[in-house]
Image: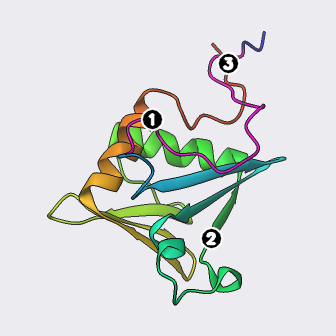
Amino acid sequence: MLTIVRYRPEITGWFTSTRTNNGNQCVEVRFDGDVVHVRDSKFRRDPANRDAAEPVVTVSAREWTAFLDTVISGVATNSELHVVTAADGGATLVHGEMRLTYTPGEWSAFVAGARDGEFDRIPLTA
């Protein structure tokens, strides 16, 4: 029997962890059908950046769920989407050639939100 444990199908816009510092620096996530998009809010704050050039990581919902499991457990996997943590607590999200780098505060807020189930996407079995 499939039980919906943590599922947010109603969210279609970009959102962040509730632990984010007023949305000023954050990992932003958007659900779009059966894919998940991830971007860095710092990109848009720089007036020199063009929206069309904004780096966005896009993965399947299943790959996203596996990634969240890795983030929460702290056990590294060999998947295409992975994170490289820095000594200062910051992190770089890596997907193929795409890299999104987050400050320690940004990454800490994301991990806390992930632990709270704020970024869960697909139904999970109980």
On screen, residue 17 versus residue 6, left or right, reads left
| Residue tagged 1 | 18
Three-letter amino acid code of the residue under disc 2: Val
**In the rendered image, the vertical position of residue 25 relative to residue 48, given as above or below:** above
**In the rendered image, the vertical position of residue 62 relative to residue 81, given as above or below:** above
| Residue tagged 2 | 56
On screen, residue 76 versus residue 95, left or right, reads left
**In the rendered image, the vertical position of residue 49 relative to residue 100, given as above or below:** below
| Residue tagged 3 | 125
In the rendered image, the quadrant that contains the C terminus is: top right
Q: Residues within 10 Å of mark 2 (few under 14, many from 20)?
A: some
| Number of marks | 3
Classify mark 3: helix, strand or loop: loop
Please provide percent x and percent y for residue 125: 67, 18
Q: Residues within 10 Å of mark 3 (few under 14, many from 20)?
A: few
The residue lying furthest to the front in this view is 47
Q: Residues within 10 Å of mark 1 (few under 14, many from 20)?
A: some
Give yes or no for contact between labels 3 and 2 (Cβ–Cβ under 8 Å). Answer: no
Three-letter amino acid code of the residue under disc 1: Thr
For image coordinates 69% across by 45% down, the residue present is 62
On screen, residue 30 versus residue 68, left or right, reads right
For image coordinates 35% across by 46% down, the residue present is 21
Label 3 vs label 2, nearer the camera: 2
The magenta segment: 4-20
Please provide percent x and percent y for residue 59: 68, 59
